[in-house]
Image (spheres, rainbow, N blue to C red):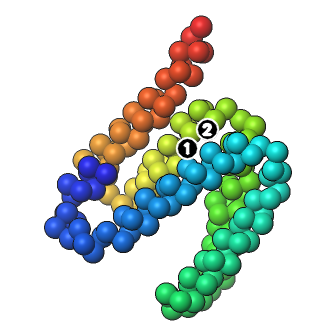
Amino acid sequence: AVLILAGQDFAQPIQLMPGHFAAMACALLWSGYSILSRRLGDVPTDAVGGFCGLTALLALLAHLVFEDTIWPQDSWQWLAVAGLGLGPVGLAFFCWDHGVKRGHIQALGASSYAAPLLSTLVLILFGFAGLTWAVAAACLLITGGAVLASIDLLRASKR
């Protein structure tokens, strides 16, 4: 957050505030969902399909109210939509639910730090982003956060 605020967009905080608030709301909703899912471990992972369906319905309503519809223009774009639905927006939710309910929650949380790091590195690798000092610092902070979050695991493995 410090790197974002110190960047070039710092002079335009009002324009960025809705996005920042939406990101904060998503973080709170996701963490709340994860905690609730852990506590309600008896609810089968299959219920995630219902949650995804309800979320899709709410997203459709929000889309119809706030956005213009733009359909994919070719088969590659349709393939990308299907790939997102099956992978990171589909199967990933089932895996997360299973991991939260039956896995090592601390290891799962620490490994989740890798997602933004890996996606940023892929963007840099394919030329869609540049490696800047801010990106390098963010990568170090993400790695540091993952190490800090898993410090108990590291200590336990040495025993």
Front position in the image: 109 or 34: 34
Residue at numbered disc 1: 112
Q: Residues within 10 Å of mark 2 (few under 14, many from 20)?
A: some
User: In percent of the image, x 44 and y 66: which residue is there?
Assistant: 22
Q: Residue at x 43, y 59 (%)?
A: 24
Give the alpha-carbon distance from disc 1 to disc 2, as whole Å. 6 Å
The image shows residue 78 at horizontal and vertical percentages of 66, 80
Picture quadrant where residue 89 is located = bottom right
Q: Position of residue 56 (x, y in %)?
A: 67, 74
* Residue closer to the observer: 124 or 105: 105
Residue 108 in percent (x, y) is at 61, 38
27 on left or right of 89: left
Q: Residue at x 16, y 67 (%)?
A: 11
**Does residue 59 appear left or right of residue 54 in this picture?**
left
Label annotation for residue 108: 2
User: Taking the image as drawn, is residue 125 in sight?
Assistant: no
Q: Say which amino acid is labelled 2.
A: Leu
- Among the 4 quarters of the image, the one containing residue 105: top right
Residue toward you, 43 or 130: 43
- What residue is shown at x 67% (from left), y 32% (from top)? 104
Residue 31 appearing in the image: yes
The quarter holding residue 123 reads bottom left
User: Of all residues shown, which one is farthest toward the left?
Assistant: 11
The x and y percentages for residue 3 are: 26, 51
Instruction: Mark 1 and mark 2 in contact? Answer it, CB < 8 Å.
Output: yes
What's under tag 1, amino acid-wise? Ser
